[in-house]
């Protein structure tokens, strides 16, 4: 798949554009096609109606399958021999038929001139002329009134002559007619051919340029249009089940349509090209702010996390992106700051014991010393090394907990016994400080890592002792309520100022920056305690009142 | 030379104090900020070694309050190694900044340089007549011959030589030669002066009766 947003946009744009152009062109093409067809159909219908009208007036024998012997013993064209009716009529090619059908050598000249405008006999009952668009009846050249029932009855041949259609202008009438002559009246825009079949399938008459009907079958519907090759034909049910076929060569219309299609294709391609270029440009404009943002984002490194995207100048959609990125940068920066502060605090914490260690070593080596002096120096060095080791271990626990790699060996443990053990461990310290230790509450069995949780309790109880007043107490209370085990460690010390409470569990945070130096803490105790409790899925909270004491509460879900 | 060490870590304080004592300095120490500030403003020290993370009063605050009326050279000795901390320390009035862990020899060299510069002496040797005092090695020679002096005697010679041509009162000598823990007797200075005159010649130190002593006056 395409991965570029610009290319995707362009692709969709192209698809939509192509569909729109195709739809528009298609509608235009179909409309034009239909209107052309309607014109042709109207002409064909007019011609067919004219022929039908003549047929209706014609005597019955004209429509009968076989003509009487004599001049009419053969049908025009090469229709089937009477009696063999039913088979499809066969035609010779138009050119051939011209000599054989229209002007047979033995055929007498037509008595009535047969050209366009030739009046048709009036209908038997007088009113209503079947031919809708025919010219008004007029006298023929001989001045005789048109033949009809009231006049001298016409011979079959005369009827045959009447059964014809005027022809339109030839195909190649592209040059304008002479200006002094009015253009000849053209009932048809283009030549129309026709053929008339009797009910039994025999051909009654066909125009010279009639195209043979390949599969003739009497039409059941009064009107039926059909397309053959490049011809449009109308099949009209005439009187006595005769069929009038009128057709027109629609090649010019076809060419017109082809020309239209070519034009539409050209215009469509042009519009598509312009549209695609415009779309490419637009897509480029739309994604330019994204490119700017990504360009800027490339420049932001870990050392420059304080940089922010300027969201004021961007559009609403991208402003959101910018704000999201900014807030992400903010979190990253805070994380990095915390990390670097932690590292610097850790290195700071390590520097002091290291300075003690190195200075005592240097001092001891600076001159010859007594064994007692060397011993004292080595003891100091060992003490510093021990302190560094503890600090490093604390840091390791913290780092493991931070990265979620603190392994817990859980087993069912009585929390009260755990608290009692912690108190037992700290008894010497409490005695030295003059602080009383109390453990109360119920036995709550919980699946915990006893070593880790004990470390947390020792930290909290130890703090309670160290930051207490002489004669004070540290009380540990274990309880269980609605599925949550609670351990409360209360002291009667000086308490913690409210502004320090939110930072209390941060690594290296000290309420009094230097006080804990005397008490020997690294500033990691509470941070580690919280991590240990969190690792058990629990939470730790603190409440404190300056002058009255603090209360740490560990809540562990069962 | 009398030096104040303000450091809250007991082991480190002990090491610094001992090394300075062994080099012949008179040393006072303080374990927290308020105590350090009190001593620094009460006595006239030749130099102060100051930690920054102090209980009660931070080293920065101590330095700021000290600088209101004292020009005592101050060397900050801190675990805070950030450039910002060093700049801040120097800007609020420290004369030098040394990051823990440090070498004791370097600490001493910086201290000597501080004391020398504070006395307006750029070189590390002082020559008065035929007497040459080497401030680095803490040795004195007379006409090219090394002279053995005790630590106290050397301190007195150094003090007078650094302030050559100036009258140094007996009180000042007491303040600079003896630490607060020394149980100094009032005539101890006279004993030291007389011993120095025996080793470096009677004319080296002149006595102004009832005022004090002067070198190269």
Image (cartoon, rainbow, N blue to C red):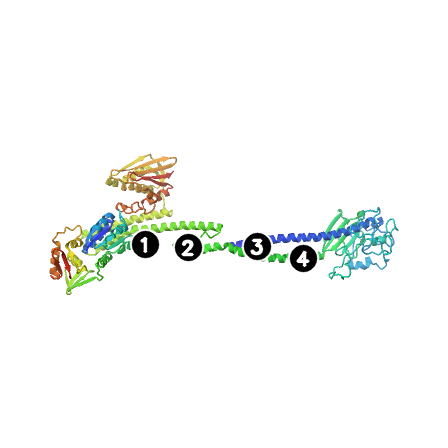
The disc at residue A300 is: 2
Quick check: do tags 3 and 1 share a chain? Answer: no
Q: Residue furthest right?
A: A152
* In the image: residue A12, left or right of residue B180: right
Q: Position of residue A114 (x, y in %)?
A: 83, 56
One can see residue A3 in this view? no
> Which circle's residue, 2 or 4, is located before the other in the chain?
4
One can see residue A539 in this view? yes
**Looking at the image, do the residues carrying marks 3 and 2 touch, with CB atoms under 8 Å apart?**
no
Mark 3 neighbour density, 10 Å: few (under 14) some (14–19) many (20 or more): some
**Looking at the image, do the residues carrying marks 3 and 1 touch, with CB atoms under 8 Å apart?**
no
Of badges 3 and 1, the one in the foreground is 1
- The residue that disc 4 covers is A258
Cα distance between the residues tagged 3 and 2: 37 Å
Which structural element holds mark 2? loop
* In the image: residue B128, left or right of residue A213: left
- The residue that disc 1 covers is B84
Cα distance between the residues tagged 2 and 4: 61 Å
In the foreground, B193 or A554? B193
**Depicted B149 relative to depicted A445: above or below:** below
Q: Quadrant of the C terminus of chain A?
A: top left
In the foreground, B126 or A114? B126
**Looking at the image, do the residues carrying marks 2 and 4 touch, with CB atoms under 8 Å apart?**
no
């Amino acid at each position: 798949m395409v991965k570029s947003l610009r290319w995707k946009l362009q692709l969709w744009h192209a698809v939509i554009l192509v569909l729109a152009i195709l739809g528009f062109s298609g509608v235009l093409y179909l409309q034009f096609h239909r209107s052309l067809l309607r014109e042709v159909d109207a002409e064909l219908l007019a011609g067919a109606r004219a022929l039908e009208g003549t047929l209706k007036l014609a005597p019955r024998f004209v429509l009968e399958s076989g003509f009487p012997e004599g001049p009419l013993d053969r049908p025009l064209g090469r229709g089937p021999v009477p009696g063999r009716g039913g088979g499809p009529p066969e035609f010779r090619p138009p050119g051939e038929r011209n000599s054989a059908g229209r002007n047979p050598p033995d055929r007498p000249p037509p008595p009535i001139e047969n050209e366009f405008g030739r009046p048709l006999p009036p209908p038997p009952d007088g009113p209503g002329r079947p031919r809708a668009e025919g010219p008004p009846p007029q006298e023929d050249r001989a001045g005789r009134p048109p033949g009809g029932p009231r006049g001298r009855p016409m011979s079959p041949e005369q009827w045959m002559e009447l059964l014809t259609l005027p022809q339109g202008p030839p195909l190649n009438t592209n040059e304008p007619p002479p200006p002094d002559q009015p253009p000849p009246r053209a009932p048809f825009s283009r030549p129309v051919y026709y053929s008339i079949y009797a009910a039994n399938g025999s051909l009654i008459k066909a125009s010279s340029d009639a195209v043979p009907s390949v599969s003739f079958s009497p039409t059941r519907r009064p009107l039926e249009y059909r397309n053959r090759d490049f011809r449009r034909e109308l099949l009209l049910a005439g009187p006595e089940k005769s069929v009038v076929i009128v057709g027109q060569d629609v090649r010019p219309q076809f060419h017109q349509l082809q020309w239209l299609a070519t034009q539409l294709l050209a215009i469509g391609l042009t519009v598509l090209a312009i549209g695609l270029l415009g779309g490419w440009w637009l897509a480029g404009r739309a994604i330019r702010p994204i490119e700017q943002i990504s360009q800027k984002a490339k420049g932001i490194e870990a050392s420059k996390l304080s940089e922010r995207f300027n969201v004021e100048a961007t559009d609403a959609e991208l402003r959101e992106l910018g704000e999201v990125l900014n807030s992400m940068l903010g979190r990253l920066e805070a994380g990095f700051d915390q990390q670097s502060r932690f590292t610097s605090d850790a290195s700071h914490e390590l520097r002091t014991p290291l300075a003690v260690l190195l200075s005592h070593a240097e001092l001891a080596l600076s001159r010859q010393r007594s064994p007692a002096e060397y011993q004292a120096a080595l003891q100091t060095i060992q003490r510093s090394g021990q302190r560094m080791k503890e600090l490093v271990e604390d840091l390791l626990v913290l780092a493991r907990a931070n990265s979620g790699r603190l392994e817990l060996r859980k087993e069912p443990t009585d929390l009260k016994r755990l608290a009692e053990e912690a108190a037992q461990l700290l008894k010497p310290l409490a005695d030295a400080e003059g602080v009383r230790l109390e453990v109360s509450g119920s036995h709550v069995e919980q699946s915990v890592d006893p070593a880790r949780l004990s470390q947390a309790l020792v930290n909290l109880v130890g703090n309670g002792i160290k930051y207490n007043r002489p004669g004070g107490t540290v009380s540990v209370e274990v309880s269980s309520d609605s599925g949550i085990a609670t351990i409360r460690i209360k002291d009667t010390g000086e308490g913690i100022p409210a502004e320090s409470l939110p930072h209390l569990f941060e690594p290296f945070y000290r309420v009094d920056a230097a006080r804990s130096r005397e008490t020997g803490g690294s500033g990691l105790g509470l941070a580690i305690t919280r991590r240990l409790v969190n690792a058990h899925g629990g939470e730790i909270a603190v409440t404190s009142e300056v002058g009255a004491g603090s209360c740490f509460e560990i809540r562990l879900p069962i | 030379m009398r030096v104040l060490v303000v450091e809250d870590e007991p082991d480190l304080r002990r090491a610094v104090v001992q090394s300075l004592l062994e080099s012949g300095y008179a040393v006072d120490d303080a374990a927290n900020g308020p105590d350090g500030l009190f001593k620094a403003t009460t006595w006239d020290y030749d130099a102060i070694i100051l930690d920054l993370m102090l209980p009660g009063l931070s080293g920065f605050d101590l330095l700021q309050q000290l600088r209101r009326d004292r020009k005592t050279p101050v060397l900050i000795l801190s675990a805070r190694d950030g450039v910002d901390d060093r700049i801040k320390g120097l800007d609020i009035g420290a004369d030098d900044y040394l990051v823990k862990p440090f070498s004791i020899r370097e600490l001493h060299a910086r201290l000597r340089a501080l004391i020398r510069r504070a006395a307006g002496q750029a070189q590390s040797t002082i020559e008065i007549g035929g007497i040459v005092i080497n401030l680095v090695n803490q040795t004195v020679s007379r006409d090219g011959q090394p002279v053995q002096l005790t630590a106290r005697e050397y301190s007195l010679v150094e003090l007078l030589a650094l302030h050559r041509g100036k009258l140094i009162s007996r009180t000042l000598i007491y303040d600079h030669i003896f630490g607060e823990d020394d149980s100094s007797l009032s005539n101890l200075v006279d004993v030291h002066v007389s011993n120095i005159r025996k080793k470096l010649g009677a004319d080296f130190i002149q006595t102004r009766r009832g005022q004090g002593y002067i070198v190269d006056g």
